[in-house]
Image: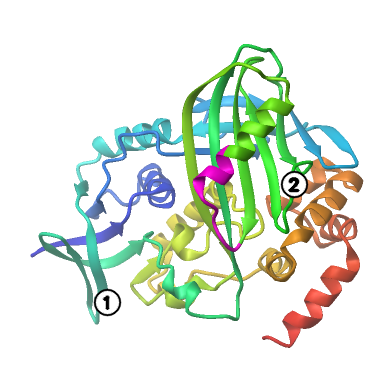
Amino acid sequence: MQHYHYIFTGTGLSTLMTVREMIRSGNFKNQSILLIDHEAKKTNDRTWCFWEIENSFPNLIHKKWEKAYFKNDSFDKEMDLNPYHYVMLKGLDFYNSVFEEISKESNITFLQEKVIDFEELGSHCLVKTASQNFTCNRIINSIFNADFVTQQSKYPILQQHFVGWFIKSNQAVFNPSCATFMDFSIQQKGNTRFMYVLPFSKNEALIEYTLFSKDVLPKSDYEKAIQEYIQNLGITEYEIIEKEQGSIPMTCYPFWKHNTKNIINIGSAGGWTKASTGFTFKNTTKKSKILCSFLETEKDFRLFHKKDKFWFYDLLLLDILYKHNELGSVIFSALFQKGNSTLIFKFLDEDTSIWEDLQVIWKCPKALFVKALVGRIFRF
């Protein structure tokens, strides 16, 4: 049975970002690393969007926007993102870049197989695939276990679920320098529903129907909403170039409680997705750097995670939206109508001071959050 220092179960964003940091640190060249995934990562299965000040991935960015747009039934607002940019990175471009780096490292192996099980066995860990078993010193797992969340009630879970169409229209209706973050002018139907639009040119854009709610919809419901939105934009003729669909868990469930001395959960499986927005990329960029440094100095994965104030802020928002899902438009509208957009992005990036936090939070409906705070205190 072959033995490795580290085995990564799953090779999604969090694994590849962590391995990328390990390679670039230069401190793991003498340690054997195995990556196992049933997918070869040869297709563009997703895109990531995030805001940043400095260009962290200069050769991989597919598109950049300097402005952002917010809209609901009563107002609309175009925001200058300076000093931020909103950027898109294609999954396949990222995969190819990281696997090219991996191919140059003789101590790292990729195996395309399905992980069946893994466990810690005292002095070592065991990983089982469909055809063979491996042992290792430490497991870094990114395979999401939904049972952790669904079999408890203390921490609510919503889904950020969406269907998106990449379209090319005969009418030049898009502003390629301005992304639509949230358009709440569509029917809410008792949920938090909005349109998300990323224009690539005057004639091309990704139009995505997105919900923050408990249950996913039939695919036809998303596509009908997209069709209606396209018509309302004044587009009469268009071609669908590509489609995407996804569902991202939004929860503050403490996944880190399932870490053991030698097994750690990362990515969505470890609670790395920002619970209040479903954004993953920026959190993963930060966490992977921290994890890489941790691996160099610490031996017990149970010491890795530290709860912070942003986890608690997100928890309050999810408590509200879980009980009153129709209030999402009200909360986000108050935030963007009254708030400083640069400060909002800094807050969502979890880079703000307490004083800056309060400047953002005070823009939200106070009674809702006070009630959620009192309710949450009694649930701890």
Mark 2 element type? loop
* Side of 304 where 138 appears, left or right: left
Position of the N terminus by quadrant? bottom left
Residue 54 seen: no
Check whether the beta carbons of the residues at disc 1 and disc 2 lie within 8 A of each other: no
Q: Nearer the viewer, residue 248 or 35?
A: 248
* Side of 245 where 49 appears, left or right: right
For residue 312, which quarter of the picture?
bottom right
Q: Residues within 10 Å of mark 2 (few under 14, many from 20)?
A: few
Specify the segment rendered in magenta: 214-223
* Side of 127 where 70 appears, left or right: right
Q: Which mark is residue 187?
A: 2
* Residue type, mark 1 in image: Glu
Residue at image x 41%, y 65%? 265
**Position in image of residue 203 (x %, y %):** 63, 15
Is residue 26 shown in magenta? Answer: no
Is residue 220 shown in magenta? Answer: yes
Position of the C terminus by quadrant? bottom right
Q: Nearer the viewer, residue 65 or 367?
A: 367
* Residue type, mark 2 in image: Gln
Residue ID for mark 1: 120
For residue 360, which quarter of the picture?
bottom right
Q: Earlier in the sequence, mark 1 or mark 2?
A: 1
Query: From mark 1 to mark 2, how far is it between C-alphas?
Result: 49 Å
Seen as rendered, the residue at the extreme left is 1
Q: Nearer the viewer, mark 1 or mark 2?
A: 2
Q: Is residue 335 above or below residue 163?
A: below
**Position in image of residue 22 (x %, y %):** 38, 49
**Position in image of residue 239 (x %, y %):** 52, 19
The colour scheme is: rainbow
